[in-house]
Image (cartoon, rainbow, N blue to C red):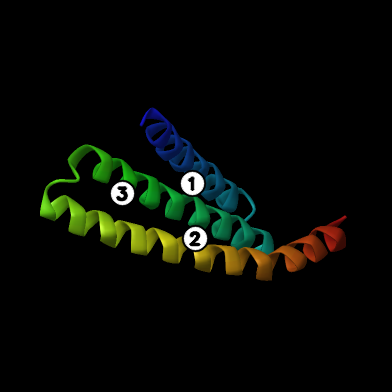
Amino acid sequence: MQIIGLLTVLSAFLYLFYKLKSFRVKKFPYRQRWANSKASIAIGFFLIFFAINQLYHDGDKMLYLVISIIFIILGSANVVLGYRAYRFFLPKAIEENEQQS
């Protein structure tokens, strides 16, 4: 399952990218929150892919199973709440960008 490992690393890089992007746009609060919501989605996918990878390699041990289920629940919550924040802040960030121009 090398694809799961690749997706894990990709989502970690996307989290870092969007987190750094949110620091660059500190003057614009809606764009910063929009970038933070995308970072939340990326870290949620990181947790999910990491848990799936753990299940694939060490799924026979009960401790790995419990921790993986917790990571999947936390990752899913991050993805869902991040997506809701993304949808909420997107029009405001677009409006903020148009006002700046």
The residue depicted at 86 percent of the width and 63 percent of the height is 99
Q: Secondary structure at mark 2?
A: helix
Amino acid type for the residue under numbered disc 1: Tyr
Mark closer to the chain start, 1 or 3: 1
Q: Position of residue 23 (x, y in %)?
A: 56, 51
Where residue 70 sits, quadrant-wise, is bottom left
Q: Position of residue 74 (x, y in %)?
A: 36, 63
Q: What is the residue that sits farthest to the top in this orientation?
A: 2
* Residue with the mark numbered 2: 79
Q: Which sits in the foreground, 64 or 23?
A: 64
Amino acid type for the residue under numbered disc 3: Ala
- Check the picture and name the quadrant holding the N terminus: top left
Single out the mark in the foreground, 3 or 2: 3
Q: Is residue 58 left or right of residue 93?
A: left
Q: Residues within 10 Å of mark 1 (few under 14, many from 20)?
A: many
Q: What is the residue that sits farthest to the front in this orientation?
A: 60
Mark closer to the chain start, 1 or 2: 1
* Residue with the mark numbered 1: 15
* Residue with the mark numbered 3: 51
Q: Residues within 10 Å of mark 3 (few under 14, many from 20)?
A: many
Mark closer to the chain start, 3 or 2: 3
Q: Secondary structure at mark 1?
A: helix
Amino acid type for the residue under numbered disc 2: Val
The residue depicted at 40 percent of the width and 37 percent of the height is 4
Single out the mark in the foreground, 1 or 2: 2
Q: Is residue 59 left or right of residue 97?
A: left
Single out the mark in the foreground, 1 or 3: 3
Contact, mark 1 vs mark 2 (Cβ under 8 Å): no
Q: Position of residue 96 (x, y in %)?
A: 78, 64
Q: Residues within 10 Å of mark 2 (few under 14, many from 20)?
A: many
Q: Is residue 18 above or below residue 96?
A: above
Q: Position of residue 94 (x, y in %)?
A: 79, 61
